Image: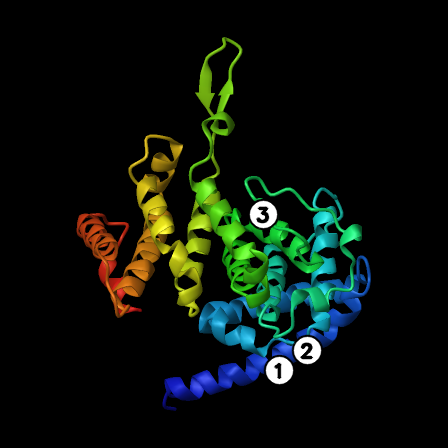
Amino acid sequence: MEDASEEDLDIKLQTVSKDLIADFDARLRPFLRKADGSGRVRSRVRALCKLIYTLCKIRGEKVIVNFLNVETRYLELLLSAIEESERHLGSDDAVIQWTWEERYVILLWLSHLMLAPFDLATISSVYMHDVDLAGVPGFLWPFNPPSIAVRILPLAAKYLASPGKERDAAKTLLVRMAMRADMQKLGILHALIDWALSSLHPSQESSDYASNDGLKNKSTQNPYTFIGVLAFLAGVMSSADASEVGKYSSKVFYTVNATMWSDDDTFDIMNSSAVAKKTIIKVMRSISLSKLTRESRDLSGIQLVETTVRYLLRSLSDKDTPLWRLFYKR
């Protein structure tokens, strides 16, 4: 029997994915409407999330996520479910503990729901006085954000620093939310970019602590925080709506470039992480390409492109940055 063509396999995979996610949709409803869900429904949701992640790994999350339900009524249900799971993180009950696959799929689904054409303020059924402005270190909330954004942002920021696949889904969720027209109008995009850039260079006071002998020692920074922040910036800078992020491009470029030459813990983290190096290249590449595609090119844009070329040439000798793959796959 001859092997099926790649196109036939792709069609079969899409059919299986569609049927599987339809079953996932049906099983998830009773679970989302209960604080803990029944044990039987709980185990099925866990198994389905593992299967959906496997399909995402095989075919790519951008394809599989299109089969997820896009009805906005799921937005608050999913948010409430994952918020409830956060409250049980320290519990000894394995039944109510979420697996990373569940968090990944729900965060990915939330990112898909961020494509809703309605303002988030009109979707939310929770009033702002019922929601606390959760603290995200370094982030300054703009005036009067919608309650859904207030609930999503701390959640996405938390998992942006995760060492697992949740980081990829959280990045997509944060980028989708930031690039929404209503969020840009409120200043969420501007605030998130400022937060991301400040996260790459934590203040001396927050990164140092005093020991018993009065000497200051370096505190250990979470390397995944930097990787997640860089991934968020790469996602924003490569967004289709480049005209909206163009005004931030130079500031982002030179801040990210400076991380590779800083004399603090950031340099050590970036220099020891292959993922961070590749993500820095993606940020610089996206910004440089946007500068080159402009009709009018100024001196600062040309200098930025030259800086990128020099950095790429230096990176050719680094085994962690296979540049031919980064450019060939674009």
Q: Which residue is labeled 3 in the image?
A: 158
Marks 3 and 2, how far apart at CA: 30 Å
Amino acid found under the numbered disc labelled 3: Lys
Q: Residue at x 71, y 70 (%)?
A: 74
Answer above or below: position of 191 versus 326.
above
Which image quarter holds the C terminus?
Answer: bottom left
Q: Nearer the viewer, mark 3 or mark 1?
A: 3
Marks 3 and 1, how far apart at CA: 32 Å
Residue 280 locus on image (x, y percent): 34, 51
Amino acid found under the numbered disc labelled 2: Asp
Residue 203 locus on image (x, y percent): 47, 31
Labels 1 and 2 touching (C-beta < 8 A): yes
Q: Secondary structure at mark 1?
A: helix
- Labelled disc at residue 19: 1
Q: Residues within 10 Å of mark 2 (few under 14, many from 20)?
A: some
In primary-sequence order, the first of circles 3 and 1 is 1
